[in-house]
Image (cartoon, rainbow, N blue to C red):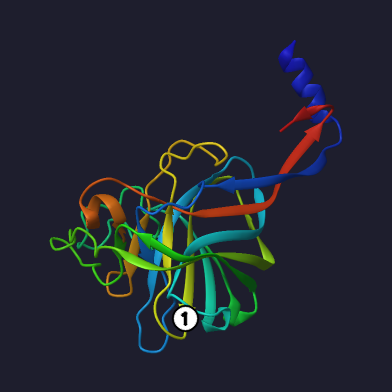
Amino acid sequence: MRYTSVLLAMMMPLTAFAEPFFFSTGAPGNQMAAASRPAAAGKIEIEAADDFLLPLQTTLTSATFTGLLPSGAAANSISQVVVEIYRVFPIDSVNPPPAGVPTRTNSPADVAFASRDSAANSLTFEFTILSSSFAALNSVLNGIHPAPAQTTGGEGVVSGEEGRFTVNFAPAITLPAGQYFFVAQAGLSSGEFYWLSGSRPIVSPGTPFVPDLQAWIRNADLEPNWLRIGTDIVGTGSFNLAFTLTGEDDRIFAGGFEF
């Protein structure tokens, strides 16, 4: 009976509906602050990445990410914001990868699948200060090294003003169902942006999912490889990064059935 109903539904006209989509790694925390910046003013690029899951094809229209700017930094010190979407290795990658890291299993791919950049007018952003003084217990900035020297323990406490970036994509980013990594970068006229850790494990009102992969990082010298912030660099534990995604997923209905 079930198969007959499905067959009849598939013979009926299809109707597409857009349902709101929202994803969150939960409240920002103070466990880790990971540098993440575009290349500029003689500084090499650093990319920090954390994953998310799309059960259906989804169009992403905006995002937020939370991090640290130098104390007293003004919004006009933010020169560039970049968001990139990576698929999971070995997609979009050379496989086997070059030597130089403990593993590439469950890492971001070699190259980005999609990107939006304020410098290219494909992204707009606002920055909101949440706290004038915030300290993270550990950080990663310069200590991104190939194996076997990858484990540094991190670079210790870093502090600054905590703020939230709200970014809007123009055009929106449409992605097929699947698992992806979200990369957020901010370039400053002076000092560094550090992306704060999120909840791990993700708990409500965040968006738990399985498997929730840990955060990765690389700089231009390590590229195309990546290192796990917790397992490889700190040497213990694992981290998520604080971000949200908003958009619409694409649902198809036929005869009262959802596909």
Q: Which amino acid does label 1 sit on?
A: Leu
Q: With respect to residue 117, does 22 lie above or below?
A: above
**Residue farthest top in this picture:** 1
Q: In which quarter of the image is the C terminus?
A: top right
Tell me the residue that label 1 is attached to: 188
Q: Is residue 112 visible?
A: no
Looking at this view, is 31 or 235 the one in front? 31
Estimate the x, y position of residue 65 in percent, counting from the top left: 53, 60
Looking at this view, is 188 or 122 the one in front? 188
Estimate the x, y position of residue 56 in percent, counting from the top left: 63, 42
Q: In which quarter of the image is the N terminus?
A: top right
Q: In the drawing, does residue 115 fall left or right of residue 44?
A: right
Q: Can residue 89 be seen in this view?
A: yes
Looking at this view, is 19 or 113 the one in front? 19
Q: In the drawing, does residue 193 fall left or right of residue 99?
A: right
Estimate the x, y position of residue 218 in percent, counting from the top left: 33, 66
How many labels were placed on the picture? 1
Estimate the x, y position of residue 220 in percent, counting from the top left: 33, 74
Q: With respect to residue 110, does 192 lie above or below?
A: below
User: Which residue: 43% across, 41% down?
Assistant: 212
User: Which residue: 47% across, 70% down?
Assistant: 185
User: Which residue: 60% across, 80% down?
Assistant: 120
Looking at this view, is 31 or 243 the one in front? 31
Q: In the drawing, does residue 71 fall left or right of residue 244?
A: left
Q: In the drawing, does residue 238 fall left or right of residue 241?
A: left
**Residue farthest bottom in this picture:** 41
Q: Quadrant of residue 16?
A: top right
Circle 1 Cα neighbour tier, 10 Å, few/some/many (<14 / 14–19 / ≥20):
many
Q: Give the secondary structure at mark 1.
A: strand
